[in-house]
Image (cartoon, grey):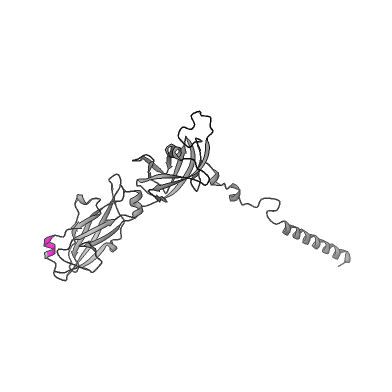
Amino acid sequence: MSRHRIRLIVAALIVILLIWLLLRQCGPGQGGSSSSPADSTRTDSTQQGTGSTDSSGTYDVPADGKTGGKPDGKTPDTRVEVRAVPMVGRTPVTALFKGCKNKFTFDFVPLAGNTVSLRDIKTGTQITAVGASVLPGAAPGQWVVVPDGDKVTLRGMYKGTPVFDRVLPVINPPNPTVVLEADDVVVEDDEEITPGSKLVFRITPDAAFALLSPEDARYKIARVMVRPKQRISAPEEFIPDASNMGQPTVRLRLKKDFLAGISNGEKIWVQLDELRRINYLGKENIEPIDKSRLSYNLMMRK
């Protein structure tokens, strides 16, 4: 190989090395944006009139903070940034229950630096809902929504202008807690009772569900099955009467002839077989319950 050809090869390698070093120094993002397509299209929802993740919005209210403003009408409005928080009493609402009447109010909290009265905001804000029906509340400022999807967008409107959005997830109503009591004491499996024991099923709705949707947190024990544990016989059905509908306790009144046929020390099997929830329309829905957790083997002592 001639010296001339060797010099050409070395010069080419030096040029390639210089180009490589130059590209390393510039790196991605030098002289241009390195944002991904998702980053380039992303917006800060807290700066938009709606879609705010923290449910805050800017209100134009009269400068004196009172409905109607100054009598002369010349004083400019004050811009107030307010956070809207759905509440039941003093408890914030973080989710809504599907197919139920969710009753709540909005607590309007001025952000730091705002001292204007919120009376105009409280009386002037209207709520619309996407993903739910809106029903009239029983009291001024109370809102009632019945969700029919997986989420609900609560939109605050003030003087016809959207000021905030609040998106809440929608969940199914939780099961209540059900226990069996004998003479006002909770019984477990294999405990003893007497023919005169007062047997009562006690139903306790989930606390958050009962607070937000009291008209939907009503229950009815539709059927209880009872039979001697060791005998091969069809279980007897105990069906509470209509007066027990929606009541927190249901007494299990065993028939005298059934009790008479139970020997001392013999076990009886008791199972809550069907529990129903009554919604705000009075419709009964069968609750999905674990029957094995609501079955009891009780020893009769005479």
* Between 294 and 250, the one nearer to me in the picture: 250
Percent position of residue 65, x then y: 48, 37
Tell which residue pokes out farthest to the bottom in this image.
Answer: 265
Residue at 13% over, 60% down: 255
Position of the N terminus by quadrant:
bottom right
For residue 202, above or below residue 71: below
Q: Front-most of 11 and 154? A: 154
Report the side of 223 relative to 89 (left or right).
Answer: left
Q: Position of residue 154 (x, y in %)?
A: 44, 43
Q: Which residue is drawn at 80% across and 63% down?
A: 13
Tell me which residue sits at (36%, 49%) in the image: 212
Nearer to the camera, 249 or 261: 249
Is residue 249 rendered magenta in the image?
A: no
Compared across the picture, whether 81 is left or right of 221 comes to right
The reply, left or right, for residue 249 in relation to residue 262 is: right
From the image, give the main secondary structure of the stretch colored magenta. helix
Q: Give residue 186's position: percent from left, percent from top.
A: 25, 63
Which residues lie in the magenta part? 254-259
Q: Residue furthest top?
A: 72
